[in-house]
Amino acid sequence: MSEIFGDYLPDLPPGHDYLDLGFSANSRPIKNRWRNNLLSAYFVADYLATFLPIDEDDPAAKRRQQDYKASVSYVANELLENTMKFHSPSDEYPVRFGIHFIDGPEKIIVLMSRNTVTREAGDRFKAFIEELLSSDPQELYLKHLEQNSLDENSQDSGLGFLTMIIDYSAKLGWKFDPIPDHPRLFLATTLVQLVL
Amino acid sequence: MNFQEIKGEDYSVQYIPESVTVKLQGELSLTGSADYAPISRLLNDIAELNPPTITLDLTKLEFLNSSGISMLSKFVISMRKKTQIKLAVVGSDEIAWQRKSLQNLLKLCPNLQLTLE
C-alpha cells in the first residue's frame, strides 16, 4: 500500500506543460555526477522561463522572472541532491526528475523527484517527514542548525526541505510505494509546489 | 596558519587580510559538510585571530545550496560567543537566494550586521 504525506497531488491535471528527465544514477560515483545536479536545475529553470513571457521593457517583470528562475533552480537542485544522495541503485528504476507547469487562477510549478530508497533509509526519511509536518518549520530549522553546529560530522539533510518551506513558501508532499520485486526497497516520490 | 585561496571549478573563496574580508564568489553546491570543511576552517582560523571585524562578502555568490547555508550558519552560531568580534555580512539585493535566505542568519545571531547592496 502506498503511503502519502503532506500536500501530495495524486494526479497532476492532464494537458499541462511538463518536462520529465531520467538519470541512470548507477553508472558513476556520486561525486563525479554532483555538478550535474546544478546543471539540471538550471536547465529546468530556463525551460520554465519559456512559459513566462515577459515584457522586456518592464524592469519589475524582468526581476520577477529572475526570481522565479532562482527559486526553481534552488528547489530543483536541493531535490536532486537529496534524490542522488539517498537513491538506492536498482536497474529498473532510474532517478526521475520532472517539472510541471500548471496554469490556472494561480500559476503553479510542481517539481517532482522519484528514486528508490532502502527500507531503513525510507523509514528514517518518514520519521523526518512526520517531525516536519508536526512542527513549526522555523523552530525546526533553528533547532537543526543549532544541533548541526555541535556535531562536526552532521548530515545536513532536511535543511533543504526546511529552506524550501521557509524561504520559498513551498508546499511539500511525499509518496512511498512498495516494490513487489524488491521487498527491501521503497519507491519514494517527492513533490514540491511553488506558487508564482 | 594558511590563508590560501580556496578554489573550485565554479567558485572561489578568497581571504583579504588588509580588511579581514572573506570573499565568496561563483556557485557553491558542494556535497555536504565534509566538502565545506576547508571553507569552515578558513573562517574559524580567521576568528581565532580575534580581529575587531570580520566581513563576509557574498555580493558575487550567485548560488549556495542548503549544505552551504548550513556551513555559514554554523560559523555565525560560533561567532555568538566571540562578542568582541563584529561580524558583517554583505550580500546583493540582485541575487534572489540572498534576499530570501540571508535574513535567517540574523535569527541565529542578532548582533550580526547584514547589508544587502
Image (cartoon, helix red, strand yellow):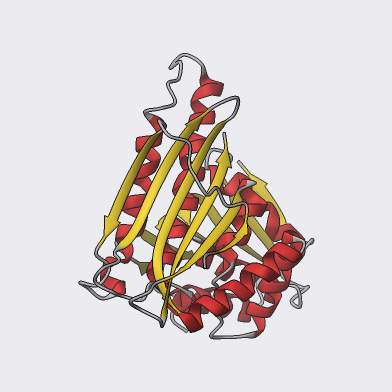
Q: Is residue A24 above or below residue A121?
A: above
Seen at 75% across and 65% down, the residue is A134
Q: Residue A157: x, y in percent?
A: 54, 71
Q: Is residue A194 above or below residue B105?
A: above
Q: Is residue B52 visible?
A: no
Q: Residue A9: x, y in percent?
A: 55, 47
Q: Is residue A33 left or right of residue A170?
A: left
Q: Quadrant of the C terminus of chain B?
A: top right
Seen at 65% across and 72% down, the residue is B51
Seen at 72% across and 67% down, the residue is A140
Residue nearer the viewer, A97 or B51? A97
Q: Is residue A65 visible?
A: yes
Residue nearer the viewer, B83 or A12? A12
Residue nearer the viewer, A30 or A96? A96
Residue nearer the viewer, B9 or B90? B9
**Residue at the extreme left of the image, as rendered:** A27
